[in-house]
Image: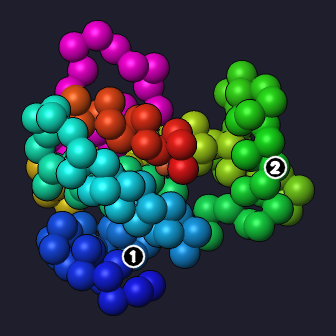
Amino acid sequence: MTPEDLALIDFYLDDPGKFLFGQMSWIDRQHALTVAKTILAKSTATTEKIELKTLVTAALLHDIGKVDGDFSFISRIMVGIIRRVKPALRGKMAMRYPATFWERFRYGLYVDLTHPARGAHMARTFGLENDIVEIIRHHHDPPRLGQSIELTWLQLIDSQN
Ligand SMILES: [Fe+2]
Ligand SMILES: [Fe+2]
């Protein structure tokens, strides 16, 4: 992580937020930083009224439901392929308690499906603001009429990164 990344984390996350951020794998932390920095860059060129602190904090924490060790290198790739090619298969194959090594990727599918709810639960338990908890909970939902502008931004920029 660069000094710029560390400053960003320091500014936007309180101690519980830093703890949750630190539980993610390196690859998910990098993804969260990319989403947060993209949001900051775009925010300078918008006339939309956004709660930037809420949005950037949510960006840093949106994938905390994926904890370091949930995915092996291979299972991350397999889950990514299934999500793109046949997302409905995730619900059929997801497995909360895999028994064998070969079922590990099915646990990855379970995490892929449940990480928004799991992350929201973790954020709530750690006392994060309700707005942030709800952005985490809904970040993979189909966009709904009347949802917050912050959720819309996160959904869009997350899907591009
Ligand atoms: Fe996610
Ligand atoms: Fe994400």
> What amino acid type is highlighted by mark number 2?
Met
Q: Is residue 154 left or right of residue 69?
A: left
Q: Is residue 149 left or right of residue 100?
A: left
The residue that disc 1 covers is 22
Image point (29%, 10%), residue name: 145
Image point (39%, 19%), residue name: 143
Farthest-out residue, front? 45
Q: Give the magenta part as a residue range.
A: 131-148
Question: Crowding near pointer 1: few (<14 within 10 Å), some, many (20+)?
Answer: some
Compared with 147, 160 (above or below) is: below
Q: Give x and y (percent) for residue 140.
A: 47, 32
Q: Is residue 68 visible?
A: no
Of residues 151 and 136, the one drawn nearer to the viewer in this rendering: 151
What is the secondary structure assignment of the residue under circle 2?
helix
Q: Give x and y (percent) for residue 84.
A: 74, 34
Q: Give x and y (percent) for residue 65.
A: 45, 53
Q: Is residue 28 visible?
A: yes
| Image label count | 2
Q: Is residue 125 magenta?
A: no
Spatial CA distance of label 2 from label 1 is 24 Å
The residue that disc 2 covers is 78
What is the secondary structure assignment of the residue under circle 1?
helix
Q: Is residue 59 left or right of residue 10?
A: right
Farthest-out residue, top? 145
Of residues 86 and 152, the one drawn nearer to the viewer in this rendering: 152
Q: Give x and y (percent) for residue 58.
A: 27, 51
Report the disc number at residue 114: none
